[in-house]
Amino acid sequence: LYQQVQTLNTDLEKQVQDRTAELQQKVQELQQLNILKDDFLSTVSHELRTPLSNMKMAIHMLKVFPVSERGQEYLNILDTECKREINLITDLLDLQRLEGGTELASTDVIDLASWLPTIIDPFKSRAKEREQTLKVKTPKKLPQIVSNNNSLSRILAELLNNACKYTQDGGEIKFIVECNQKKSSKKNLVESSFSIKFMISNPSEIPASELPKIFNKFYRVPNADPWKQGGTGLGLALVKKLVEQLNGNILVTSSNGWTTFTVEMPV
Ligand SMILES: Nc1ncnc2c1ncn2[C@@H]1O[C@H](COP(=O)(O)OP(=O)(O)O)[C@@H](O)[C@H]1O
Ligand SMILES: [Mg+2]
């Protein structure tokens, strides 16, 4: 019996080894396919962007000439659609670049007190268009932080954009900034680190089952855009990558009819 068990055991081990080798082979194939897909996507995106930029220029030139009212209307449609397409392709290329993960963000000193209004003010007027209000709450004294200006603006603008988009007319959107000092003691040393939290809340709930998916590329919650605001599902995927690139954290919670995105950044 002992011998039988031992043969069985070796058989099983051999089978496991074979299967593992098979799986490793499959994983390698898939990884290669993934690289091919990424290359394809970025080549195609580049190729698509060039003619679009030329089209945009041509539209711009046409707008200078007097055209009929109808003509002007069509030109405006062309202009909007062109911009939308360029934005989509730019998002795709940015994501592709960030997924490469090799690039380090350059650092800027950002004076939050003067910088924040340049991000928030455009959304105040945008909110007004749908009779929404944007409430801002920040500490009296805002610090200077070291971060990447472009990435941080993009993150906050994308989140504010979503908050406006996914809120009914007349709703209230909240933007809250908090500065925190964390003290941690290691042996006899007391270290303190500063972090800054940006919280953006809006009156709209995302079902718990959807929450893990919203950061996926191209994912949009089904039937969650009754106001027909449109989107590509790339915004949050980009935000997540940008936050990671800046060594920050992003968290989303949704309950009691409210959704809150919290971005925490080291200072
Ligand atoms: N602030 C928010 N409130 C409610 N739902 C949101 C909010 N932000 C994102 N979502 C949901 O997550 C999905 C993915 O967001 P995003 O990646 O920005 O794509 P897009 O806005 O282009 O649809 C949205 O389609 C929406 O359903
Ligand atoms: Mg979005």
Image (cartoon, rainbow, N blue to C red):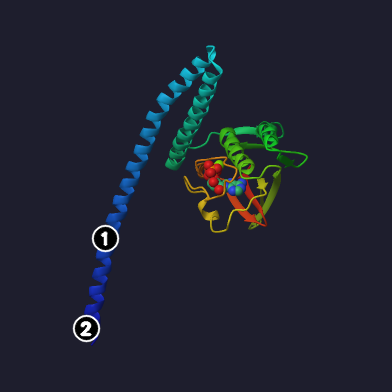
- Label 2 SS: helix
Q: State which quarter of the image contains the N terminus.
A: bottom left
Image quadrant in which you'd find residue 166 = top right
The residue shown at (68%, 34%) is 129
Kindly identify which residue carries mark 2. 4
So how many labels did they put on this image? 2
The residue shown at (52%, 28%) is 80
Residue 4 visible: yes
Q: Is residue 24 left or right of residue 68?
A: left
Q: State which quarter of the image contains the C terminus.
A: top right
Residue 236 visible: no
- Label 1 SS: helix
| Relative depth, front residue between 226 and 38 | 226
| Mark 2 vs 1, N-terminal side | 2
The crowding category of the residue bearing disc 2, from other C-alpha atoms within 10 Å (few below 14, some 14 to 19, many at least 20), is few
Query: In x, y percent, where is residue 9?
Result: 26, 77
- Quarter of the displayed picture in which ligand 2 can be seen: top right
Q: Is residue 44 left or right of residue 262?
A: left
The residue shown at (23%, 74%) is 11
Looking at the rendered structure, the kind of residue marked 2 is Gln
Answer yes or no: disc 1 within 8 Å of ligand 1: no
Distance from label 2 to label 1 (Cα)? Answer: 26 Å
Q: Disc number at residue 21?
A: 1
Question: Outermost residue toward the bottom?
Answer: 1
Q: Is the residue 65 above or below the residue 255 in the image?
A: above
| Relative depth, front residue between 225 and 9 | 225
Question: Outermost residue toward the top?
Answer: 65
Query: In x, y percent, where is residue 255?
Result: 65, 57
Query: In x, y percent, where is residue 153?
Result: 60, 35
| Relative depth, front residue between 168 and 34 | 168
